[in-house]
Image: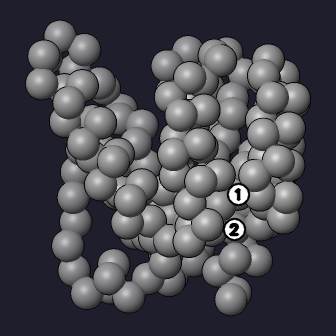
Amino acid sequence: MAHIITAPNEKHNLSIYHSQKLFLAGGITNCPDWQSELIELIKHHDNLTIYNPRRKNFPIHNPNACEEQIVWEYRHLTTADIITFWFSRGSPNPIVLYELGRYGLSNYDKRIIIGIDPEYERKRDVEIQTSLSRKSTPIVYSLEELADVIDEYLKW
């Protein structure tokens, strides 16, 4: 069973250090809880640590929560072996667009997978930018397809 670490929590043990680390980059605010759906599809992997930035209850009134969240995400985006980017309906996903540019399209050392909800309003922008920067990067259009590509990556 995969190790699942949800922001802002940390977990340190040897099995995490010997597993593949997957970061779930994608919309949270005004977006469906796609992270839970994807985790259900991939949690059977023993050699996987999943970093999930979606908190069950974000303490919006805590002035330190935003910085804590950004630092947690930065640390795990930087150390992840694989990053999935899911562009969800419900939001233009500005932070995800930034993360795709910063950690995905400009960093050829990272294995990335891009998933786009068919109803995502900036779908074509993501497709064009990806084709210009990393043509071989897989782009899929469902969480099931995203899980399939993750499965393939973990076989390597």
- Residue ID at (49%, 56%): 23
- The spot of residue 7 in percent (x, y) is 30, 44
- Asked if residue 89 lies left or right of residue 72, the reply is right
Disc 1 crowd rating (10 Å Cα; few below 14, some 14-19, many 20+) is many
Report which quarter residue 16 is drawn in: bottom left
Q: Is residue 80 visible?
A: yes
User: Going 79% across and 17% down the picture, which residue do you hit?
Assistant: 121
Residue 116 in view, yes or no: no
Quadrant including the C terminus: bottom right
Return the mark for residue 155.
none
Is 149 situated left or right of 128 in this image? left
Location of residue 111 with respect to 84 vertically, above or below:
below
Residue that extends furthest to the top in the rendered view of this protein? 61
Which residue type does callout 2 highlight?
Answer: Ile
* Numbered mark located on residue 113 in the image: 1
Q: Which residue is drawn at 42% across and 37% down?
A: 54
Q: Which of marks 2 and 1 is nearer the N terminus?
A: 1
Near-viewer residue (70 or 141): 70
Percent from the top left, x then y, of residue 79? 37, 66
Total numbered labels placed on residues in the image:
2
**In the image, which disc is placed on residue 150?**
2
The kind of secondary structure element at disc 2 is: helix
Labels 2 & 1 near each other (Cβ < 8 A): yes
Displayed quadrant of residue 128 = top right
Q: Crowdedness of circle 2 by 10 Å Cα count: few (<14), some, many (20+)?
A: some
Tell me the kind of residue under disc 1: Ile
Which residue does the image show at 85% across and 58% down from the upper left? 135
Q: Is residue 26 left or right of residue 62?
A: right
Distance between mark 2 and mark 1 Cα atoms? 8 Å
Q: For the residues carrying marks 2 and 1, which lies nearer the camera in this image?
A: 1
Q: Where is residue 60 in the image (x, y as percent from the top left)?
A: 25, 14
